[in-house]
Image (spheres, helix red, strand yellow):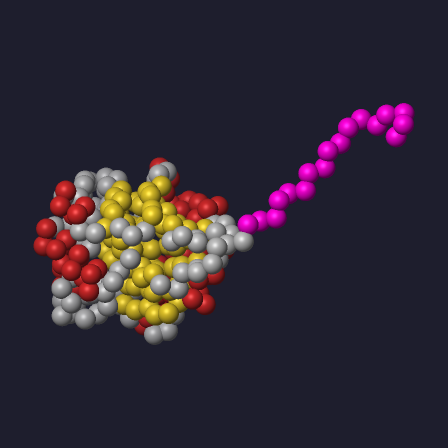
Amino acid sequence: MITVMSLNIDGITDEKLDSLFLYLRMHSIDVCHLQETQVPSFPDYAYNKGYQIFHSAPLRGKSGGCATLVLDKWSCKQLPTFPDEGDVCWTSIDTGNEVYVSANVYLRGSLNDPDYTETLTAVIDRLANLRSLRTHVMLMGDLNVEASRATDQVKHAITENLVCNCSMYRVDLQAPLDDLPTHIPWQAGEQQRHLDALAVDERVRSRVASSGIDLDGAEPLIPLSDHRPLWVSFMTRTRKVPSAAPPIVFKTSEATAEH
């Protein structure tokens, strides 16, 4: 079993890191995807908390930045981020019998429809290319898109089409999670919205054991961000993926008189 979480943390601080690591231990989180770290790097002490930390710093100014934290027991590595992919942290996690590649993304709400389409297409096309018999893909993060918001209709349609074409399963859009907010603004009178995504490889769907959006205000981490943690637990493969049959090679040569 592996449990994967995603959260827009709205800026890394010492207080938030203390609450984050407490939360991860309390809920046995294996892989945590954070968006909007808003820092160039993590403090040294954060690397001694039982998690490997992979961070892509904000692209411009203070806003942005994505980090993926992976429990020490898992073999993992960070993959490079390409210029056209925007704010994204790529991580490959080897669970022994299969590999999970996650794209941890932050897409700014200020992106217009063409720029949003171009950026998300670059990310999902790469996920599709990385997908294989042994490699499963995941898309986590803050898309800043809500299906019911009139101004997001184009972006939502594009997102659903791309996710479907990559054979991924939007856990967060399954009942009853689809009716729950992932963003609860601090400001009075602002509408609660479902802006974040939690998508796993379609082949994992049958192995999902549980999922949720944490709205419990008593949790140590939750009061420190106006976004809410999304998580999913699923079974990992217990047997090795069978090797592909060796290719058949035909050797040819020029015909002779005897032939």
The one nearer the camera, 215 or 22, is 22
The image quarter in which residue 230 lies: bottom left
Query: Is residue 257 one of those drawn in magenta?
Result: yes
Which SS type dominates the magenta stretch? loop
Quadrant location, the N terminus: bottom left
Q: Residue 173's x, y, as percent? A: 37, 67
For the point 58% across and 49% down, the residue is 244
Decide if residue 77 is on the left or right side of residue 190: right
Residue at 44%, 45% in the rendered image: 126
Vertical arrangement, residue 218 with respect to residue 243, above or below: below
Task: Please determine whether, in this image, residue 43 is positioned above or below residue 34.
Answer: above
Give the position of the C terminus as an image quadrant: top right
Residue 142 at what x, y percent from top left?
29, 55
Q: Position of residue 225 (x, y in %)?
A: 17, 59
Q: Can residue 103 be seen here?
A: no
Instruction: Identify the magenta region.
Output: 243-259
Image point (48%, 55%), residue name: 240
State yes or no: residue 66 in magenta. no
Q: Residue furthest bottom?
A: 176
Residue at the far front: name it. Answer: 239
Question: Where is residue 146, by image quadrant?
Answer: bottom left
Nearer to me, 51 or 211: 51
Quick one: which residue is furthest to the right in this view?
257
